[in-house]
């Protein structure tokens, strides 16, 4: 619980939802933060799992792969042990079952040998050696009778223990065989040695029975590392095994090594029980561990694939989500502003209308009162100083009329502040408005010049209000020029977002002083007529439509109004 | 122009102020003319006392209406200047008074009176004066839907706790029978829009039990919209 | 103009009374009502020839009064008086059967002209 409390505020700060009206940067930061968080949450467990799996698999698989190897080696070692034990027993049997006399009789020995060979094809020869080391009798293919073995190591060995199994050796015969010798001692102390030679074909058979794959090599070495059987890759029989003799162990073992060829191999070995031989199986590690490597690479592939997918999904999702959020925030803001906007306008309009109407009432009363006085003055015969009185009374009535006009304008103005947007062609509107003034132009001989840009892009704006603006400016221009003067209108594309219009006249122009106040409400140079609201309304409308208006003028030369209008109505941002 | 209007609200304010100014000119003319007539009557020896009296009555009525007009023009001018600054210190006591005036016609049509009930101390908030007025105006418009005729709605600004301010709307002078005529303010049609508008100004609406109606509560350090 | 019976309906007393006086100076019979109820009462008591009706009144609005009048007295001409912001109501009123509308502050000559025209158009029609 405490942890949660600790994390939550921090997390909240990290995941702070941007306030309304935030800059895009806040959303960018939010996107980034959500992305990071999601990536961390998904990838870390995935990676953890992948690592754990990797190690689990590694050990499990290794066990899985190495185990059979170990078992195989063990089994084969047992077979070898059994085989050798069997052979030894056989020789021992011969040594003990027959008397010295039986065995020294060569004919007898041969018979025994023949029977022996029939049962045990591996036997190559059989011989009797007396206690002094002299080969007394011999059955076999070689000529060994009379040979003395007293000097030989195995003889010494047999004298101590009662049996001997030799390593593979070549001797006279130039092919590998082993010799088994057993010493038999009678009760009377007489002893003799029966020696038999066994070829290593059985060895090869046993090894072959392991059923190894072609890339593996199984062979037997002695403690000095001399090959006892043929090795496929590493050397010939009785050659030195280039692989280091593994440390002795009672159990079969598997170690990883590099073979002389530089390949990584798994070396499974087992020490024989009965002799100093070691069964070695060399399997290329790649071969053995191929399944593991496949799994490893598959795991990696899946992991990388998953991470990629996660990345893509997280990025896309976050972006989509935050974009939606941003979008809806923005739309909501826009809607609120729109509502406030329209609310404001209608409210201001309504309020202004309300107050203006209120003023209307006292005005109406004053009007009637003044009218009453006027009636009285006019209807009463012989009213003294009629004219004198009628003066101020009329003044009151006129003042009321003026007020009425003003409030009327104000309300109309407030109402007109609502804009109706259409796509329209400004040239068209200019032509239309100029058309209104054609008669007057003709009558007064005013030259109308139209220089409307061909292919002027259409814009989004309010037709009625543009008409008003153009009409107002043209009216002013007409008022400024004398008969025979020139008024010209030009339209052009200002830039990628804006179009422009110029209204030029060669009328009397305006002074610097006048120019300063030109857009002020109620500022008028026309004496008596007009409320002076025209240009200020024009200014307001142009601004409302998102545009700009400029005026240049020189006294005596003329005046130029320039109006810029946006092609697209931008939200006139209200602060 | 001292400073060009930057927003439509400012522009409308400028125009309206000009109109108000013009009206006062007009009223001044009327006042003067009326005064002149009075003077002429006084110095005239030929007009009968009856005529003088009659004119006198008429002229005093004219003066009355001129005063009324001036008062209205002043208020209109005040209102027009609400949009001068988009953010400024606003005394809600003044605002309540202003809106009570602005909305009185609307209320009178429904037979309801508005009464501004100022607090003893100024109740200041930093915000858009025009928008605050609009908010209150919308509040009243909303209330006019649910309040029956013949009642008076009081507009009372006050300071709430921890630098917050509030404006309360309440019914004055009601009894058991009138309770039935007033349904909950949140039943008004534009209640949701009103809440939204209030939220834009950092304010919340709290409906209260009769005779109170609801309160607009501005969050502390309230923002302008 | 002589003897025309006019009913003025307006909540602004100063206005109505002054206008009534001005009409009387010109020889008309002018009565006043300050609200819709009073107006209807006066109409039923003593039918006028024409009603001058202000659209902006509290309580029963001008248009409502117009509707009521037209129900009971379809041929009684009504001229509406509108203010600056209520010309819409004037147009609406004409759809509801008013003869015409005028904007306050008035030109009294204009009003009298309209009254004359309205009375002429209803002459010969059943009262």
Image (tube, coloured by chain):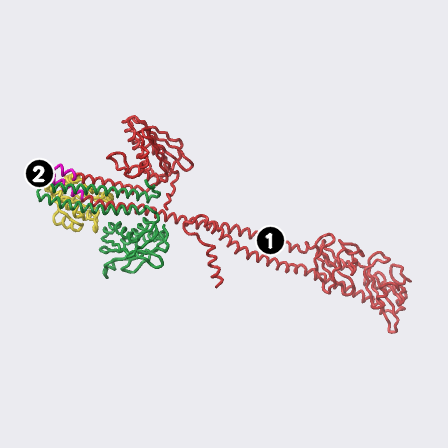
Chain colours: A red, B green, C yellow
Please report the residue visible at 22 percent of the width from the left and 39 percent of the height from the top: A402
Q: Nearer the viewer, residue C61 or B212?
A: B212
The chain under label 2 reads: A
Percent x, y for residue A477?
Answer: 31, 31
> Can residue C117 be seen by looking at this rendering?
no
Percent x, y for residue A467?
Answer: 32, 36
Please name which of the two marks, 2 or 1, marks the residue nearer to the observer.
2
Q: Is A74 contained in the magenta span? A: no
Residue receiving disc 1 = A300
Percent x, y for residue A326?
Answer: 43, 49
**Would residue C91 be found to the left or right of residue A279 on screen?**
left
In the image, the segment drawn in magenta is: A366-392
Q: CA distance from mark 2 to mark 1?
A: 119 Å
The C terminus of chain C appears in which quarter of the rendering?
A: top left
The N terminus of chain C appears in which quarter of the rendering?
A: top left
> Can residue B38 be seen by looking at this rendering?
yes
Q: Callout 1: 10 Å neighbours few (<14), some, many (20+)? A: some
Q: Which mark is residue A381?
A: 2
**Would residue A456 be found to the left or right of residue A172 on screen?**
left
User: What secondary structure characterizes most of the magenta part?
Assistant: helix
* Count of residue discs: 2
Percent x, y for residue B77?
Answer: 27, 45
Please report the residue visible at 80 percent of the width from the left and 64 percent of the height from the top: A87
Q: Nearer the viewer, residue C103 or A296?
A: C103
């Amino acid at each position: 619980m405490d942890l949660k409390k600790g994390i939550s505020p921090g997390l909240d700060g990290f995941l702070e939802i941007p306030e309304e009206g935030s800059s895009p940067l806040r959303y960018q930061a939010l996107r980034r933060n959500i992305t990071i968080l999601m990536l961390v949450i998904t990838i870390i467990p995935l990676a953890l799992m992948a690592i754990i799996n990797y190690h689990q698999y590694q050990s499990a698989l290794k066990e899985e792969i190495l185990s059979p190897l170990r078992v195989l080696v063990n089994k084969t070692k047992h077979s070898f042990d059994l085989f050798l034990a069997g052979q030894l027993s056989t020789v021992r049997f011969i040594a003990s079952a027959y008397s010295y006399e039986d065995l020294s009789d060569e004919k007898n020995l041969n018979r025994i040998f023949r029977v022996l060979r029939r049962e045990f094809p591996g036997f190559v020869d059989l011989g009797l050696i007396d206690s002094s080391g002299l080969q007394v009798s011999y059955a076999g293919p070689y000529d060994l009778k009379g040979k003395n073995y007293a000097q030989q190591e195995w003889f010494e060995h047999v004298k101590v223990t009662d049996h001997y199994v030799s390593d593979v050796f070549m001797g006279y015969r130039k092919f590998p065989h082993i010799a088994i010798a057993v010493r038999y001692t009678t009760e009377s102390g007489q002893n003799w040695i029966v020696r038999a030679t066994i070829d290593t074909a059985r060895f090869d058979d046993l090894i072959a029975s392991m059923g190894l794959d072609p890339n593996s090599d199984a062979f037997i070495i002695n403690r000095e590392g001399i090959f006892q059987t043929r090795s496929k890759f590493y050397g010939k029989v009785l050659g030195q095994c280039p692989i280091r003799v593994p440390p002795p162990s009672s159990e079969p073992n598997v170690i990883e090594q590099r073979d002389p060829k530089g390949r990584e191999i798994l070396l499974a070995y087992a020490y024989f029980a009965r002799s100093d031989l070691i069964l070695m199986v060399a399997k290329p590690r790649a071969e053995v561990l191929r399944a593991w490597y496949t799994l490893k690479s598959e795991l990696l592939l899946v992991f990388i694939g998953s991470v990629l997918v996660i990345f893509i999904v997280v990025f896309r999702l976050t972006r989509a989500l935050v974009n939606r959020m941003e979008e809806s925030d923005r739309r909501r803001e826009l809607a609120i502003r729109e509502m406030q906007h329209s609310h404001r306008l209608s409210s201001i309009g309504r309020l202004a209308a309300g107050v203006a109407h209120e003023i209307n009432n006292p005005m109406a009363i004053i009007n009637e009162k003044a009218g009453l006085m006027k009636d009285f003055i006019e209807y009463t015969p012989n009213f003294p100083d009629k004219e004198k009185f009628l003066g101020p009374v009329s003044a009151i009535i006129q003042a009321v009329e003026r007020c009425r006009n003003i409030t009327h304008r104000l309300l109309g103005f407030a109402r007109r502040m609502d804009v109706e947007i259409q796509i329209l062609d400004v040239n068209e509107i200019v032509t239309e408005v100029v058309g209104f003034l054609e008669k007057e132009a003709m009558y007064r001989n005013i030259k109308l010049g139209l220089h409307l840009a061909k292919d002027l892009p259409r814009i989004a704006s309010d037709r009625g209000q543009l008409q008003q603006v153009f009409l107002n400016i043209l009216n002013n221009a007409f008022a400024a020029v004398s008969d025979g003067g020139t008024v010209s209108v030009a339209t052009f594309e200002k830039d990628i977002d804006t179009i422009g219009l110029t209204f030029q006249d060669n009328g009397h122009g305006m002074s610097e002083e006048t120019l300063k106040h030109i857009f002020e409400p109620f500022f008028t140079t026309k004496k008596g007529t007009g409320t002076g609201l025209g240009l200020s309304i024009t200014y307001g409308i142009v601004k409302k439509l998102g545009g700009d208006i400029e005026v240049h003028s020189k006294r005596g030369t003329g005046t130029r109004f320039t109006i810029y209008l946006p092609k697209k109505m931008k939200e006139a941002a209200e602060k | 122009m001292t400073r060009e209007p930057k927003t439509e609200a400012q522009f409308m304010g400028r125009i309206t102020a000009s109109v108000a100014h013009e009206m006062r000119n007009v009223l001044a003319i009327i006042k003067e003319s009326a005064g002149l007539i009075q003077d002429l009557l006084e110095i005239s020896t030929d007009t009968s006392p009856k005529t003088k009296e009659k004119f006198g009555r008429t002229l005093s009525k004219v003066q009355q209406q001129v005063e009324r007009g001036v008062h209205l023009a002043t208020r209109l001018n005040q209102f027009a200047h609400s949009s001068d600054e988009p953010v400024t210190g606003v005394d809600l006591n003044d605002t309540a008074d202003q809106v009570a005036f602005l909305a009185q016609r609307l209320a009178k049509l429904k037979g309801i009176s508005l009464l501004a009930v100022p607090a003893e101390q100024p109740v200041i908030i930093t915000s858009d004066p025009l928008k605050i007025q609009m908010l209150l105006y919308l509040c009243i418009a909303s209330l006019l839907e649910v309040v029956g005729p013949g009642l008076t709605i009081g507009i009372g600004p006050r300071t709430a706790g921890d630098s917050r301010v509030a404006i309360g709307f309440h019914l004055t002078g009601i009894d058991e029978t009138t309770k039935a005529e007033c349904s909950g303010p949140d039943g008004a049609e534009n209640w949701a829009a009103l809440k939204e508008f209030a939220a834009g100004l950092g304010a919340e609406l709290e409906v209260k039990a009769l005779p109170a109606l609801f309160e607009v509560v501005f969050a502390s350090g309230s923002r302008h919209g | 103009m002589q003897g025309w019976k006019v009913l003025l309906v307006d909540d602004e007393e100063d206005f109505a009374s002054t206008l009534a006086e001005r009409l009387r100076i010109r020889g008309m019979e002018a009565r006043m009502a300050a609200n819709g109820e009073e107006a209807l009462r006066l109409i039923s008591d003593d039918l006028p020839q024409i009603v001058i009706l202000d659209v902006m009144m509290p309580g029963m609005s001008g248009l409502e009064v117009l509707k009521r009048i037209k129900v009971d007295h379809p041929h009684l001409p009504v001229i509406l008086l509108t203010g600056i912001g209520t010309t819409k109501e004037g147009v609406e009123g004409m759809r509801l059967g008013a003869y015409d509308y005028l904007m306050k502050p008035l030109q009294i000559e204009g009003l009298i002209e309209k009254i004359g025209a309205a009375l002429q158009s209803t002459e010969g029609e059943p009262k």
